[in-house]
Image (spheres, rainbow, N blue to C red):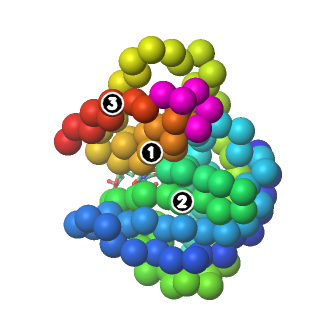
Amino acid sequence: MKREFFTVVYNREVARQTYEMVMQGDTSDITAPGQFINIRLKDLYLRRPISISSYKDGELTIIYKIQGIGTKNMSELPSGEVLDILVSSGNGFDVSKAHGKVAVVGGGCGVAPMYGVAEALVREQGITPTVLPFA
Ligand SMILES: Cc1cc2nc3c(=O)[nH]c(=O)nc-3n(C[C@H](O)[C@H](O)[C@H](O)COP(=O)(O)OP(=O)(O)OC[C@H]3O[C@@H](n4cnc5c(N)ncnc54)[C@H](O)[C@@H]3O)c2cc1C
């Protein structure tokens, strides 16, 4: 886990109370889809954990829903804002042993990291998974 500074590229509402934020910064510590980041937010003592939805060299995307003060604060962050982030926590998902037919299942905000898992399955294993989101 490493402390890094990321710059917001954009932050937009993609569904009711749900936002997609794309940020640029050093992503070299991310080792697997499904890991999460911890974001420091103004005037809040505790960082807020949010899963990495997808990532590539120098860029990561999160999908989050407004639940309270921290995520409301996040939803108002403009492009160009610099964020203090701990990258990257959690083990993530190991897709290297996946074979045959694969289903990716997630519910609520748990679908956010499933995007990155599906991307890794296609990129690393040549598997196009069946994605089953549920409410
Ligand atoms: C490892 C991890 C990964 C996560 N990934 C995502 C993600 O990709 N997208 C996303 O939208 N959210 C994700 N979350 C949940 C997110 O961290 C919380 O919604 C966020 O911290 C709430 O902060 P807040 O300041 O907006 O809410 P607060 O003001 O702190 O809380 C508002 C209300 O929501 C309740 N609450 C807060 N967090 C949770 C929770 N995790 N579960 C149930 N009730 C809660 C509080 O008890 C309170 O009643 C993740 C959580 C963890 C632990």
How much space separates mark 3 and mark 2, taking CA atoms? 21 Å
Q: As drawn, is 81 to the left or to the right of 15?
A: right
Q: Is residue 2 depicted above or below 19 in this figure?
A: above
Quarter of the image where the N terminus is located: top right
Q: Residue 65, image x and y in percent?
A: 35, 59
Q: Which residue is mark 3?
A: 130
10 Å crowding of disc 3: few (<14), some (14-19), many (20+): few
Q: Quadrant of residue 31?
A: top right
Asked if the residue at label 3 sits under 8 Å from ligand 1, the reply is no
10 Å crowding of disc 2: few (<14), some (14-19), many (20+): many
For badge 3, the amino acid type reads Thr
The residue under the point 55% across, 84% down is 79
Magenta stretch bounds: 123-127
The residue under the point 36% across, 24% down is 103
In the picture, the disc for residue 115 is: 1
Residue 54 seen anywhere in this rendered image of the structure: yes
Q: Which residue is mark 2?
A: 61
How much space separates mark 2 and mark 1, taking CA atoms? 10 Å
Q: For residue 47: magenta? A: no
Q: Quadrant of residue 96?
A: top right
